[in-house]
Image (cartoon, helix red, strand yellow):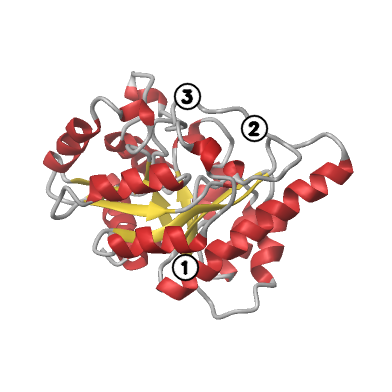
Amino acid sequence: MSYLIIDTHSHLNFSAFKNDAEKVIERCLSENFWIINIGSQFETSKRAVELAEKYEKGVYAAVGMHPIHVETGVFKPKLDPEEETADRAKEKIFNAEKYKKLALSGSRRVVAIGETGLDYYYRPKTKTRQEVFKQAQKEVFLKHLELAKELNLPVIFHCRMAHQDLITTLQHYNNTAFKGVIHCFTGSLEEAKKYLDLGFYIGFNGIIFKLDLNEVVKEIPIEKILVETDCPYLTPPEAGIERNEPIFVRYIIKKIAELKNTTFEKVAQKTTENAKNLFGI
């Protein structure tokens, strides 16, 4: 393959790849696929940085705390066996200074803050507890935005069943504008347009094979689209195996090209250009 493809959201830093992450990376690089590994809490952020620093180019990292790991005091989500969880219990609060030091230690390879945002999929049952739960997530989210602003880095946003709250929070964020991508977009076309109005990119992955996002994909300008896998999750059906890998981002590109009635090459080249512009790589 003569042109470059970038998986803008990967988790080779998770335990699902503990035995072969480097082999997967080498296979990707040999076929001209680049990778951005995304942190979900401190240990996976650290692992993402460590992986990135092993390579001269083609492997990058983002550091942050996923909203499901925010200590709310009212709800404890289930642990994910695919993710590194050994040290999660120790991380009771989001220590911005700790993440800042990690980002600066790998500044040559750290290209974003995240993933961060809001996730209301698993939540307490009572309204009072839900409000405490949501407020705790928002407070940690805003700390990520401040860190991104301080380090002049884009933000990788996670949002599940919380688009209206995320949009409202971003619209009222009273500091200078920053760049970012709405990872694994699952919202409506109207919500997507609001994110575009705020200047963000929209990230598509294997979720487009599970949810009906055809209209959204068709309507979002190619200049504002990033492609990703979210591996080891959301494996495209054509991959033929259970565990997702960065190289399978080709199936996301193929689907987008079909929906937009254009070529694979055009989508690949434009989304790579978009990724380079956003992340400075």
Residue, disc 3: 81
Counting residues from the start of the chain, the first of labels 1 and 3 encountered is 3
Kindly identify the residue that appears in the image at 26 percent across and 55 percent down. 269
Residue kind at label 2, given as amino acid type: Pro
Residue kind at label 3, given as amino acid type: Pro
In-front residue for pair 171/87? 87
x and y percentages locating residue 211 in the rendered image: 58, 34
Residue, disc 1: 148
**Number of callouts:** 3
SS category of the residue bearing label 1: helix
**Farthest-out residue, bottom:** 176
Give the alpha-carbon distance from disc 1 to disc 2, as whole Å: 26 Å
In-front residue for pair 205/28? 28
Question: Which labelled disc corresponds to residue 77?
Answer: 2
x and y percentages locating residue 14 in the rendered image: 38, 34
Counting residues from the start of the chain, the first of labels 1 and 2 encountered is 2
Task: Give neighbour class at mark 1: few <14, some 14-19, many 20+ (Cα, 10 Å).
Answer: many
Task: Give neighbour class at mark 2: few <14, some 14-19, many 20+ (Cα, 10 Å).
Answer: few
- Relative vertical location of residue 62 with respect to residue 76 in this rendering, above or below: below
Q: Left or right: where does residue 113 sit relative to residue 21?
A: right
